Structures are given as C-alpha cells and as structure tokens.
Amino acid sequence: MSIAHSTWPVVLIPYNLPPWMCMKQPYIMLSMLIPGPSSPETDIDVYLQPLIEELKELWVSGLQTYDASRQETFHMHASLLWTISDFPAYANLSGWSTKGKLACPSCNKDTCSLRLKHGRKFCYMGHQRFLEANHIFRSDKSSFNGTKEKRLAPIPLSRTQQDTGGKKQGKRGKTRVQEESPLEENSSASAAKKKEKPPKEHNWKKKRKTKDSVKARLDLQEMGVRRTLHPVTTIRNKTYLPPACFTMSPKEKEVLCNILKDVKLPDGYSSNISRRVNVRERKISGLKSHDCHVLMQQLLPLAIRSSLPMNVSSVLIELCNFFKELCSKVLNVGDLLKLQDRIALTLFHMEKIFPPAFFDIMVHLPIHLVDEAMLAGPVQYRWMYPIERYLLTLKSYVRNRSRPKGSIAEGYLAEECLTFCSRYLEGVQSKLNRPVRNDEDAHVEMEEGFSIFSLAGRPLGEVKSCPLDQTTIEQAHRYVLFNCPAVIPFIAGIKIDAFGYTVVNMTRHIYKNEPFVFASQAEQVFYVQDHPGNKDWHVVVKTKPRDLYEVHGNNDEGDVQTKAAEIQNLEDVNTCEQIDIVGTEIDEPLEQLTQAIPDDEECDTDSDDSDGDESPFVNDK
C-alpha cells in the first residue's frame, strides 16, 4: 500500500476476560474504518460520533444479551475505560495540544517548559519539583537555572477541570473558539507585519543526528550552566566543542555493537535484533517498536556497562529498570509509590547529564506513567504492541489496493465467521485451540506440597524413581549448600557486578554431573556476553514464559532481577571528562554562531504559540 494512503481502523477491546485471552486478536472487535487517503486529524470526532452514541446507549440503557455458559439472558451494560493511541493522536482525540508551552496534559497549565533560544524548540525540565519538599537536590543551583526549586508537583486536574480545559482544534491549528472570535483579524494583521524570512538553502550533505549539537552547547552557554561544555574559540579561529561525559568513542561504540550483535534470545521473545546491528558502521537501524522495548529493558543496560562512565551508565540503567518494573505482569501499589520517587530522581540526574534539547515532551511523560498504572493497572493491557500486530493483520486482508477499506472489511467478516464456527467444532484443531510452538503447559495446576517443588514448566521425558547411594546423597547436600545466598560470593565462576547483574564464567563448571535441581529454581534465562575482551563471562538475564500469568502470585518476577542503581550519592556528573575522546571542531567561528536570533524568528513546529519577547522560563510559580 502507498505510504500516502492512510486508513484508520477503530477497534474495541473487552477487558472482562482472563489475562491469557485479553488483548488477543480473536477478541478484538473492529467497530469502524475511517476512510483515506488522508488522516482525519482534528475531525476524528465527527467519525467517532456514531460509535459514541452506541456506547452511551450501552451504558445508560443496556442491552439484553444471551449468556451461552449459563444459558440465560441478562442485561448487559458497557463503559469506556480509556483509549489507546500514540501521543500525536492523543491531541486529535482529546483536543489538547501536545506541542508548545503546555504540551503535557497531566501538568496542564503548570507545565514547566523552557524555550531554547538557539535550538528554537521547547524543552521540558524542572523535575526537581517532583522530589520531596525537603530534598537536598532542590537547592542545587549550579546545575540548572541558578535558583532553588521551591515549587511543588502539579496537582492533577479534577474531572470538571478536564472537561472544560481542553482546546479542541480546527483544521488550521486554531481553536474553534478562536475561529469565531473577533480577535482573529487582529492576529492575522500582526502576523502580516512580520518580516519575510529568506528562503532556506538546501544542504544535501547528510547531517549527523544528535541532541548534542552546536545549538545545544550554545543554549548551555546562554543558561550559564556546565561551563566545561561551553564552546570555545581555538587559535585557528574555529569553534571547539569539548567532549561530554556521555560521548562515546568509536571503540566504545564498536564494543556496544559487538555485544548486541552476539545476542541470542529465546524463541518468540523478540525478533532477531542482531540482524539490525551493523558493527562496521557502528549503527543500529530497522528496529520495530517491540524491538526497542526489548532493547531498552533487557539489552541496553548490559551493553552500556562497559561503554560509558559509571555515573552516566548507572542513571541510564536506572531508567531502563524503571520501565522494566513498570511493565511487569504483576504490580504492587507499594512498589509503584517507590517507583514514583525513583523516576523523579532519575530524571533529575538526567538533567545534570544531557543537554536541555534532549528533554522533549516524550522524556518528560515517564514522570506520569506511575500514576496511570495506579489508576488503570498493568501496562500490558494498555500498550500499543497488540494493536500494531492487529494492524498488520488488517493490512494483510488488502487484495484490491485501490479499495483498501472494502478489502479490510471483507477480510474481517470472513475471519469473524471462521472464528465463530470453530468454537462449535470439537476435536478439530483451529487457531484458537492449537498449542504454541514451545508449549510449556504453564497453566497446569499443581498438587499441594512444598513451595520448592512448584513446577514452572513441563518435565522432559518419562519420570523415573531410583534409589540414592552415598555419592548421590552428598551431591544433593552440596547442591542445597551451594544455592544458599551466603555461599554464592565464594563460588568460583560466579560474581555480582556493581549494577547487581549476575555474571558467570561459561568455561568453568562446578560439577558436570549435577542430578539435583529444585523445581522452583528452574527458570528461563538467556546469556549476553559481558564484554568482547571477556569472552568467557556472560550476564544472566531472567525471563518469564510468554503465556505464564501468575494471577494470584506476588511481584517476584524473573524479568525484574536487578536492584535499583544507587544514584542518591553520585558525584557531580558535570565534571566527568572523557580523557581518551577528542571533542568536535567546527569551521565556523564562535562569534558567527552566537549571533542574536531575531525576535520574529519563530520556533519549529512545536512552538507556534511562543512569544519572542517574554522570558524563556514559562512557569516561574
């Protein structure tokens, strides 16, 4: 299908289903198709109006429905819990502009935004306000704008404020109230007084994509922070950018790419990420959204351990651990409260490391994810991955590319009919009842007994009983002893690194013939090479089987094994220098780069509501 064509399917997902059935494709209902070839943009509410009316009827009046399991009729009511979309589509659905000063819908009018003079974009920092009122980091002046942070975290809006606070936009990017306002003519007149911008010269030379650009360094100089990173003028009248603490040398990039290139993941865990890594060019490209999910939560912390300084990698690992624990299948309210404090501290340390241009609205939004999890529950029932897989299925229905909407509707109806008929076929294997490729039979209920004999998978082969001789008894005793936490540090070939990861030497075996293992200790793991220079050492990464749901279990999940990085007492990361890395030299002189930007110079697409004469600090409460 053409990239220019855009067809928007609207699906409904019932949530009164078991975890292993919820969000699966047979239980996703395609309610409507918004035709293309262009997206509906802000007029999406017009297309959704029939669906909204039906949902209101289901909530108020209800509908008589037949229950096949009980063979009786009941009165069914339905309520809309939430919508699942990306952040740009959120602006179309809610009417709240996700660009400019007030881009955060949760902070609303208390959004702390800063317009960068040289970058000509908005950044969203000020995460000190989310720390405790008496936190010591609130008094840190040198790392930020030179003032103490006395503001408190923004108070979430009430339902009445949310209903009246949205800004429904029209096709031209203006609110519908503004279209009928008599001030529109004055606004157009003032806009016409602006000087015409000279046409931009096209530079066909490929530029390096980075947030640590010359404009970012000039913004640091404008803010008066991190003086060691300010651009300087060399003897040859060129501009020199000192290397930052997060700058990686070509050798370190090659080490990171080699670690990702040698990764072998379990079957069905993700796509083959190693194919997306180009070690020669030191690039990672072609990743899908779920690949980025696995890369950030599992692989990136392991790769940057040996590529970045300790005080930089620990902050990034803490950010990865935050998303890892937030995406757990089981969430605890007490743990979520601790996560809220940790993410505020993590973002605070990131503000001391990365330039302000790095902090766009997507970096700010994690501060509100914990509140959403406390309201709506586990994340896997609200993320986009099942929807994206379903969109691929709908796209496969297209046979007539000139009529994609009709092809999708016809294919969906055929799939629904086959699914309905397969439920009445007994003894016939279909898409709904066929076993997975690696069936572990994880839902088998075990008999009552000791917890150490709980089964997490299925045994291989026939179970046999045999008497134990003296040697075997000693092996059993040794196995129990070696699995005590106090003895692990003294076992050769096993160590715990500074970040809490378990690293094992694959060439050293305690005993090759070890017949004993507790059933509760059998877990699914895979190994990632620690460092290309230490080929014998591998990091142990624990995972959970794909279809295992511990509904009544605790939060002791295998994929959350590392402890939170202790970043409370980190040294000042601004003084971190990369000794073996040379900075960047630019041919243009510093005076030419620091020329004042005219007041009528507008920002990029996310700053259309900015005023060049006002202070860059939007919120100074």
Image (cartoon, rainbow, N blue to C red):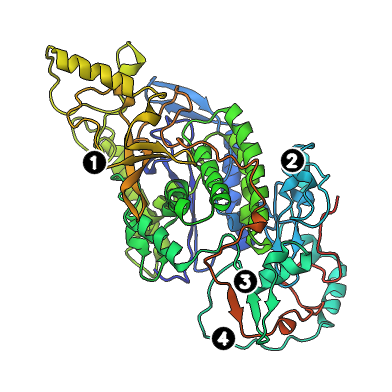
- What kind of element bears circle 3? loop
Q: Pointer 2 and pointer 1: residues touching (CB < 8 Å)?
A: no
Find the distance from the CA under tag 3 to the CA under tag 2: 35 Å
Q: Residue at x 70, y 46 (%)?
A: 106
User: Which of marks 4 and 2 precedes in the sequence?
Assistant: 2
Amino acid type, label 3: Ser
Q: Earlier in the sequence, mark 1 or mark 3?
A: 3
Q: Amino acid at mark 1?
A: Arg
Q: How many marks?
A: 4
Q: Nearer the viewer, residue 206 or 588?
A: 588
For label 4, count other residues whose C-alpha is less than 10 Å away and answer few (under 14), some (14-19) or many (20+): few
Q: Position of residue 34 (x, y in %)?
A: 51, 58
Distance CA(mark 1)–CA(mark 3)? 48 Å
> For the N terminus, which image quadrant?
bottom left
In what element is the residue under mark 1?
A: loop
Does residue 3 appear anywhere in the picture?
Answer: yes
Q: CB atoms at circles 4 and 1 under 8 Å apart? A: no
Residue at screen point 70% across, 56% down:
124
Is residue 371 in view?
no
